[in-house]
Every structure is written in structure tokens, then in C-alpha cells.
């Protein structure tokens, strides 16, 4: 089965936080790939990947960046697939507020579903992706429903 989710990040330095996203997708059997593609430093490589992603079978992007976090918005500008944005606390101001504001304040018509800053957001990006994909993938829906049952039972 081709990968459904592309996890993008602006720098290799984002990887330790974003490994949590991949681990949760793996736990739920969601095929995914991970790419370091900076909107600022590698715009051409980012564009090439994003505009060909849907034809390759991808259904959703998770894009993480810190500082002047252009990546999630740049991905949205190039694709109609859903984009989940993860703000990271990389710069020396704001503890990630800079990235949060950059990602969450997309103009109407270009949505990026923005999650919490850092590790919580990295994890919730995976869960949100799973919930979206579960709408059209019965196998993912089944695994997620079982997880929710365990969670409700206190497991
Ligand atoms: C952003 O700048 C990246 O997403 C990263 O969070 C931050 C710092 O990048 P490096 O200088 O560590 O490569 O674009």
C-alpha cells in the first residue's frame, strides 16, 4: 500500500520531536514517509515533492517548523490535500509562539489545521491525521475505535 501521510519538517533539528508523530502513525498501521524540506532553504525541492504527492497516493500532509514557520502554509499553497501544522519551539523568542502565530493565522481559503506547540502537537498531529483517514479507511477506523475503547476504559 502506498504511503498516505507525508511528514515534512523544516530542518533535521526538528526530527527528535517529530519522531513521535511517525511512531504513532506506525502504531496504527498508517503508512507514511518523512522528509526534511525547508520552505526557505529548499523551495524548489519542496514544490516538486508537494505538487506530485497526490498522484503518488498521499492523502494528507503533516508539516512542522519552528521560528518563521512558513512550511505548513507553503505546502497548503501548493496542494488541496489537508495540511496539519505543528509549531515547534526552535527560536529564542516566545517558546514557539512565533511559530504558532505563523502557522495558525492562515488566511481564509488556505487552511492549516494547527495543533499545540512541540511534543504535544507532534503527537496530536498523528491522532488528527488518523481520525481524518479513518473516515475513508475501515482498517484504520477499526484500530482507532479499539484505541478509543481502551482509552475510555482507562487503559
Ligand atoms: C525552521 O528553522 C526549522 O523548522 C527549524 O525548526 C528551525 C531551525 O532550523 P536549523 O537552523 O536547526 O536548521 O525552518
Image: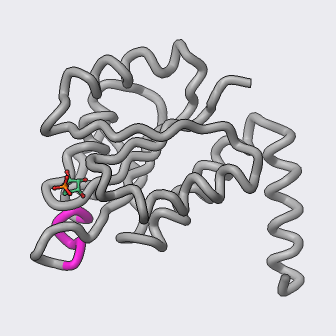
Nearer-the-camera pick, 16 or 87: 16
Instruction: Please name whichever residue, 136 or 56, is drawn nearer the observer in this view of the structure.
Output: 56
Q: Is residue 91 left or right of residue 111?
A: left
The correct choice, above or below, for 44 with respect to 23 in the image is above
Which corner quadrant of the image does residue 97 belong to?
bottom left
Of residues 131 and 39, the one nearer the viewer is: 39
Residue 106 location (% of width, % of height): 25, 48
What's the residue at 35%, 43% (across, down)? 111
The answer to whether 78 is drawn above or below residue 30 in the figure is: above
Q: Is residue 92 left or right of residue 45?
A: left
Could you say where residue 86 lies in the image, as x and y percent from the top left? 38, 58
In which quadrant is the N terminus drawn? top right
Magenta segment range?
95-100
The residue sitting at 54% across, 36% down in the picture is 33
Relative height, residue 64 to residue 3 (above, below): below
Magenta stretch containing residue 70, yes or no?
no
Pick the quarter of the image with the C terminus. Answer: bottom right
Amino acid at each position: 500500500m502506498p504511503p498516505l501521510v507525508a511528514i515534512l519538517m523544516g530542518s533535521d533539528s526538528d526530527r527528535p520531536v517529530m519522531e513521535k508523530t511517525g511512531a504513532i502513525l506506525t502504531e496504527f498501521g498508517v503508512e507514511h514517509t518523512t522528509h526534511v524540506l525547508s520552505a526557505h532553504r529548499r523551495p524548489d525541492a519542496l514544490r516538486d515533492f508537494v505538487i506530485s504527492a497526490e498522484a503518488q497516493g498521499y492523502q494528507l500532509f503533516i508539516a512542522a517548523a519552528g521560528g518563521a514557520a512558513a512550511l505548513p502554509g507553503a505546502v497548503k499553497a501548493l496542494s488541496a490535500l489537508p495540511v496539519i501544522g505543528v509549531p515547534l519551539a526552535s527560536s529564542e523568542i516566545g517558546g514557539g509562539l512565533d511559530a504558532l502565530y505563523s502557522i495558525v493565522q492562515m488566511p481564509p481559503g488556505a487552511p492549516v489545521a494547527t495543533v499545540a506547540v512541540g511534543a504535544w502537537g507532534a503527537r496530536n498531529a498523528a491522532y488528527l491525521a488518523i481520525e481524518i483517514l479513518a473516515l475513508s479507511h475501515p482498517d484504520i477506523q477499526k484500530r482507532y475505535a479499539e484505541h478509543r475503547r481502551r482509552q475510555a476504559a482507562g487503559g
